Amino acid sequence: MTPGDFLRKNIEFWHWHPRLLCKGLTEEQLYWQPDDHPNHITFAIWHAYRSEDDILHQLLGSANTFATQGWADRLPVAEPGDSGFGNGLNREQIAAVHLDLPTLLDYAEAVGKAVQDYADSLTDETAAQELPLPFFKPVYPMLDTMSRFEIINFFSVGHVAEHLGEVQYIKGLLGLQGAAL
């Protein structure tokens, strides 16, 4: 098995799963913000895939999908925050992030395809190559370096799953089922 083969089902699932989580949701539900939490469902999804796209491609030395495939025009965010993917925004700024859901879901899948294409290009040797993560060290000292394979797994599976769990949390607060059983 190649490194890409080891990741394939997880990348496919975690980049398709928002379609299931958002099926049948109303505009009001997509943009509702819990009293004790600033994010709404659409923002959590946008942040998950925008951050994955930017961070992963920067670390792995390739151009991000957002820029190279024209997603900036299709998913415009007037105030993208300190990072370009929502970090540093306050509750009101997050509330102002309104995006077309079908386009956002297409973007999630496009990011997954780009990540899978990159993973498929890795050999065992390049997948094992360690890269520094200086931005993580102050908060997560055990993550000061990761292999290319670990970076893909961390951002394309772990970080995305964290934010899709957030979507399920918000749905639960709305009295809705988080994910299909």
Image (cartoon, helix red, strand yellow):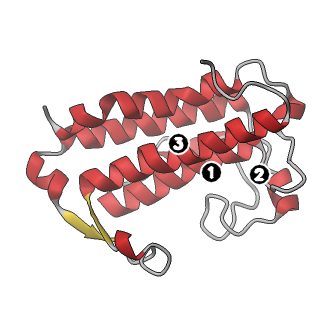
User: Can you tell which quarter of the image residue 91 is in?
Assistant: bottom right
Label 3, label 1: how far apart the Cα atoms are:
12 Å
| Percent x, y of residue 84 | 61, 62
Label 3, label 2: how far apart the Cα atoms are:
16 Å
Which SS class for mark 1? helix
Q: Nearer the viewer, residue 173 or 103?
A: 173
| Percent x, y of residue 9 | 35, 27
Which SS class for mark 2? loop
Give the foreground label among 3 and 1: 3
Q: Amino acid at mark 3?
A: Ala
Query: Which residue was labeled with disc 2?
Result: 39
Which SS class for mark 3? helix
Is 62 displayed left or right of 23 in the figure?
left
Q: Residue at x 11, y 45 (%)?
A: 123
Mark 2 in CB contact with mark 1 (< 8 angstroms): yes
Give the foreground label among 3 and 2: 3
Query: Which residue was labeled with disc 3?
Result: 161
Q: Residue at x 79, y 24 (%)?
A: 25
Residue 140 in view (yes/no): yes
| Label 2 environment density (alpha carbons within 10 Å; few <14, some 14–19, many ≥20) | many
User: Can you tell which quarter of the image residue 6 is in?
Assistant: top left
Picture mark count: 3
Comes first in the chain, label 2 or label 1: 2
Q: Amino acid at mark 1?
A: His
